[in-house]
Amino acid sequence: MRPRPAAGGERPSPVIRHSKGREFVDLDEDLTIRDIENAITDGFAHPEHLKRYTTAAMGPSQGRQAAPAVLRVAAAARGLAPEDFAPTTSRPPFTGERMGLLAGRTVTPTRYTTMQARHVALGAQFMPAGAWVRPAWYGAAYGAEAAVAAEVRAVRESVGLIDVSTLGGIEVRGPDAAAFLDRLYTTPHLKQPVGRGRYAVLCDEAGAIVDDGVACRLAEDHFYVTATTGNADATFRALTWWQAQWAMNVDIANATGAFAAVNIAGPLARTVLTPLAEGVDLAAPAFPYMGVRTGRISGIAARLLRVGFVGELGYEIHVPMADGEALWDALMAAGHAAGIQPFGVEAQRLLRLEKGHVIISQDTDGLSTPHEAGMEWAIGKTKPDYIGRAAHRVRAARGFERVLAGFRLRDRLAEAPEECCLVIEGGEIAGRVTSAARSVACGGIVLGLAYVPPARAAIGSAFAIRRASGATVEAEVVKAPFYDPDNARQAL
């Protein structure tokens, strides 16, 4: 692309100035002849310096349109022939590119839990979950609805087992561990008793929810904090970033890969687990809801969390990663007589929806605050500060344009709307559906969560949902949780 002198020494393609001074040479970056000349006058005469100072040839065309013109203008400004002013390295689309290099990844890094072989043997159908592969349900690929319903019924009526090793696990140790978490999360942790877990919500400086989990106090100076599967690494980075700012006396370690975990849930969970438990009393008075204990399960050192994401009596059991398969085998064998059923992510999502529990990044987005998501109960009312508190005050003073509301479809035979279907009011977009499914435990009606204007969030209010096909279906706001509103079952 370097022009050569014509016969007789005359240079081709001279620089011709516009009569009105509008001499654009790079339409991508809106650069004129004067911009190029000024850069050289300022000392950026080398082609690489000139390119970075002016951003010439750095736009969408990567020099395809502008490079020859910039080259001639720069050469003229330096009193050189264009062929004596070396161009910078040309990149696609200026130069050709092989189509094979544009095809994207051929190998995607994938993580499996230590129970993967057991899931395969049980006929699991898999789905991606962040970098992990998790069982979606167990059974034939074409029988998802029936398989998920059977798994849900097992958890509600007897006992189920799910692999939750993909959850993040973060160790926070040190004299300032409680103070550190208290400054970080919306929930209070300074006076959290040892042996208790506390639901923890993490927000960013703008007040938006970025993750949730359970902060378990194992000792005065030791917390074990869980995080969601998709946000585990980001949450760990957030904790280390704030520790770098505050320089508190804590040590933070990402232990996600160090533990395998399962959740055994259902009214018979304690019955199945008790014969395997050593050094821990599973009775409700000794091990209440949101309690945290250490002991052994089938001889394996374990941390036990009494949590209720699916709305039933449940124990989340965390063991060393190498012992995950042995733990799974022990629980499946112990629960055989009770009809224990492994369940996957699809059943878990339906179970939590019946309880009205929010999934971060599904029922929230990059702007959702705890107040909008119906989680203001997770904010410590007397806390002096936490990440996002100032933003929460400002947004509360302005008022909220949307809130997350539970709903049911009025037509019992209607199919569940897809996630992100629009809420329509007066022909305009007024919100969106975040979760919806046909309930198993609530009589087969379609239940869901959706963002709606505050004026439409009152119990009994009606709104329209537009399906992907363009058809609309009527929904009615109902109070969540839809199942066991008194939380009696998870507190058994």
Image (cartoon, helix red, strand yellow):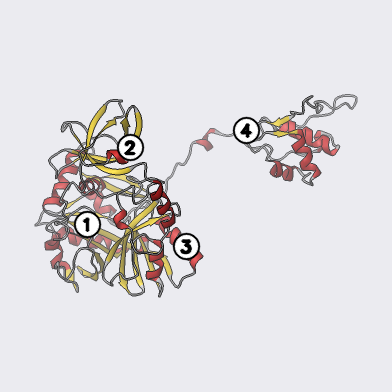
For the N terminus, give its image quadrant.
Answer: top right
The total of numbered circles placed on residues is: 4
Does residue 372 appear in the picture of this structure? yes
| Residue positioned most to the left | 337
Residue 308 drawn at (x, y percent):
22, 57
Q: Residue at x 72, y 31 (%)?
A: 25
* C-alpha gap between disc 2 and disc 3: 33 Å
* C-alpha gap between disc 2 and disc 4: 38 Å
**Residue type indicated by callout 1:** Gly
Q: Which residue is mark 3?
A: 242
Q: Residues within 10 Å of mark 1 (few under 14, many from 20)?
A: many
Q: Which residue is mark 2?
A: 432
Q: Which residue is mark 4?
A: 61
Q: Which residue is mark 1?
A: 308
First along the sequence among labels 2 and 3: 3
Callout in the foreground (2, 4): 2
**Residue type indicated by callout 3:** Trp
Q: Residues within 10 Å of mark 2 (few under 14, many from 20)?
A: many
Vertical placement of 375 versus 275: above or below?
A: above
Question: At numbered mark 3, what does the secondary structure look like: helix, strand or loop?
Answer: helix
Examine the image and state in which quarter residue 314 appears: bottom left
For the C terminus, give its image quadrant.
Answer: bottom left
The numbered disc on residue 105 is none
* C-alpha gap between disc 1 and disc 4: 54 Å
Vertical placement of 14 versus 188: above or below?
A: above
Observer-nearest residue: 297 or 226? 226
Q: Is residue 473 left or right of residue 167?
A: left
Q: Residue at x 67, y 40 (%)?
A: 55
| Residue positioned most to the right | 8
Does residue 451 appear in the picture of this structure? no
* C-alpha gap between disc 2 and disc 1: 27 Å
